[in-house]
Image: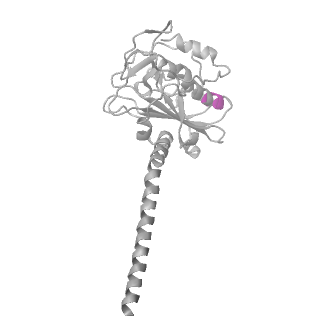
């Protein structure tokens, strides 16, 4: 009798064990099946993560938009940090590359582009040889300002407020090698948002970070974010440093024609910027 009970007990334990192991196999199988989805989700999150390295590792996909929203397009700046007009310039790194600049701005820092002198500083990755793209002669590289010239008036070269000073023009801490397209089209979108806010007498914190990959000398892009003290201006975006029809070797800054490089043209025409864009083009 005891033997039969023992057999039944052993049989029950065996059935439960098989069921348990089978369940574990199903769980493991479910996890394994979900790994690709998890991996893809992680990649997508990295593309919008407010992390320098994650942004630097992103690659531009031909045909996509000229900029990418970071952190759901919400700035990581704190409006309460605004105290007075100044620009905090980051120092050049060990490769002589620009790092970042954070500007605390008011309407007193607005100026006009007319009458500015020529720039001579050569930022890292500067190899500005003219090219003909689709029948149009272009200079594929510009000296791109981190803090735009027209919102940097009344600051000296060190970013201290000083009435009567012209805008930051040829300051090595405020210049990087930027494509014509990125500088004259995409950056204009965000700079105009800042200018409009300042013209409406708002106070704005505006930060631009040049994003390099490894030891490359030409930025992969420009990380731009701003917030006004009243919260009505708030953005956080990554501007790709690209040029339609031109491929760049970011390690050196050299370029060559490549018809495969295409950009989704989603640039709005910002009212009042037409003359500004034309003036910029005439400077290079």
Q: Quadrant of residue 125?
A: top left
Magenta residues (range): 194-198
Quick check: can you spot residue 82? Answer: no
Q: Residue at x 51, y 19 (%)?
A: 181
Q: Nearer the viewer, residue 27 or 101?
A: 27
List x then y, in percent, for residue 180. 49, 17
Check if residue 196 falls in the magenta segment: yes
On screen, residue 257 above or below 216: above
Dominant SS of magenta comes to helix
Is residue 102 covered in magenta? no
Is 72 placed above or below 267 here? below
**Residue 81 in sight in this render:** yes
The quarter of the picture where residue 184 lies is top right
The N terminus is located in which quarter?
bottom left
For image coordinates 44% across by 17% down, the residue present is 246
Residue 271, x across and y down, in percent: 68, 21
């Amino acid at each position: 009798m005891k033997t039969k009970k023992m057999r039944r007990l052993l049989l029950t334990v065996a059935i439960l064990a098989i069921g348990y192991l089978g369940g574990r196999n199903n769980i493991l199988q479910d996890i394994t099946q979900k790994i690709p989805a998890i991996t893809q989700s992680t990649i997508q999150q990295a593309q919008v993560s407010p992390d320098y390295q994650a942004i630097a590792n992103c690659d531009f996909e031909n045909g996509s938009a000229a900029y990418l929203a970071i952190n759901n397009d919400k700035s990581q700046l704190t409006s309460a940090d605004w105290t007075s007009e100044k620009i905090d310039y980051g120092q050049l790194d060990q490769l002589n590359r620009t790092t970042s600049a954070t500007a605390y701005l008011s309407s007193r820092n607005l100026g006009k582009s007319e009458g500015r002198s020529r720039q001579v500083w050569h930022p890292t990755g500067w190899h500005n040889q003219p090219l003909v793209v689709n029948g149009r002669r272009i200079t594929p590289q510009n000296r791109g300002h981190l803090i735009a010239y027209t919102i940097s008036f009344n600051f000296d070269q060190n970013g201290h407020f000083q009435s009567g000073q012209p805008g930051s023009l040829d300051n090595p801490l405020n210049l990087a090698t930027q494509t014509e397209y990125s500088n004259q089209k995409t950056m204009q979108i965000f700079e105009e948002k800042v200018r409009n806010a300042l013209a409406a007498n708002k106070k704005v914190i505006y930060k631009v970070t040049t994003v390099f990959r490894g030891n490359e000398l030409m930025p992969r892009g420009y990380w731009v974010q701003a917030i006004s003290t009243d919260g009505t201006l708030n953005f956080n975006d990554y501007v790709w440093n690209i040029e339609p029809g031109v491929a760049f070797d970011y390690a050196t800054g050299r370029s060559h024609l490549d018809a495969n490089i295409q950009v989704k043209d989603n640039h709005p025409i910002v009212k009042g910027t037409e003359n500004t864009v034309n003036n910029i083009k005439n400077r290079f």
